[in-house]
Amino acid sequence: MYKKILAPLDGSENDEVVLDHVKRLAKEFGAAVNAIMLFRLAPADDPFERNIQMEDGSLGWKAKRKAESYLPQVEKALADEGIPVSAEFLVVEQPEADAIVKYAEEKGCDLIVFANRERSPIGRFFFGNIEEKVRRRTTLPVLFVSARKS
C-alpha cells in the first residue's frame, strides 16, 4: 500500500511519536522513509540577502547545524530497524507547506506523516498551521499522529 513515507521533522519531542508510527508503518508495508527538516529563507531579490540568512550565527545556520546533528540519529535509528531511509535538510524560498508537498511529489512519496500540534486560535491566526496547509494542498494521504503522550 505505502512504498515511500515522508516524515517532515522539526527536532522536537513530537518527532518521537511520529517516528514511532513511521517505523511501524514502514515495517508493516516494507516502505522506505524520507525524513526532512527544512528552513525557509525570507523573501529577498538580492543574492546577498539570501546568502546572509545562512551565514555563521544566523537562524538558517543554526537550523542547519541542528539538522546536521539530528538527522543522522534519525537515519541510524531507522536503518537499525532495517528500514531504508533518506534524510535531508532543505533550504527553501517558498512557504513550508508548498515545499513539503513539492518534495513529496518529486520523490514519489505516497504518505505524509505529521504530529498533530495543538495551537490556540491566536497561534493559528498569527503562525498558521503548516500541517493543515499540507493536508489541504496535497492529493496524498496525510496521517496526523497525536503528539500527546498517554
Image: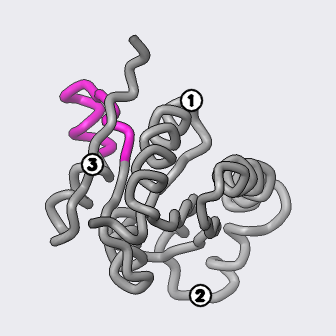
Q: Position of residue 14 (x, y in %)?
A: 49, 33
**Residue ID for mark 2:** 46
Q: Position of residue 51 (x, y in %)?
A: 70, 78
* Mark 2: amino acid: Asp
For the point 60% across and 67% down, which residue is it? 84
**Residue ID for mark 1:** 13
Instruction: Give the secondary structure at mark 1.
Output: loop
User: Which of the marked residues, 1 or 3, is nearer the chain's N terminus?
Assistant: 1
**Looking at the image, residue 148 lies above or below residue 142:** above
Nearer the camera: disc 3 or disc 2: 3
Q: Nearer the viewer, residue 78 or 93?
A: 78
Residue numbers of the magenta segment: 114-128
Residue 124 belongs to the span the image colors magenta: yes
Give the distance between the C-alpha atoms of the residues marked 1 and 2, in whole angstroms: 36 Å
For the point 33% across and 63% down, which residue is it? 97
Residue 64 belongs to the span the image colors magenta: no
Q: Position of residue 114 (x, y in %)?
A: 37, 47
Q: Residues within 10 Å of mark 3 (few under 14, many from 20)?
A: some
Taking the image as shown, residue 34 lies to the left or right of residue 59, namely left
Q: Residues within 10 Å of mark 1 (few under 14, many from 20)?
A: few
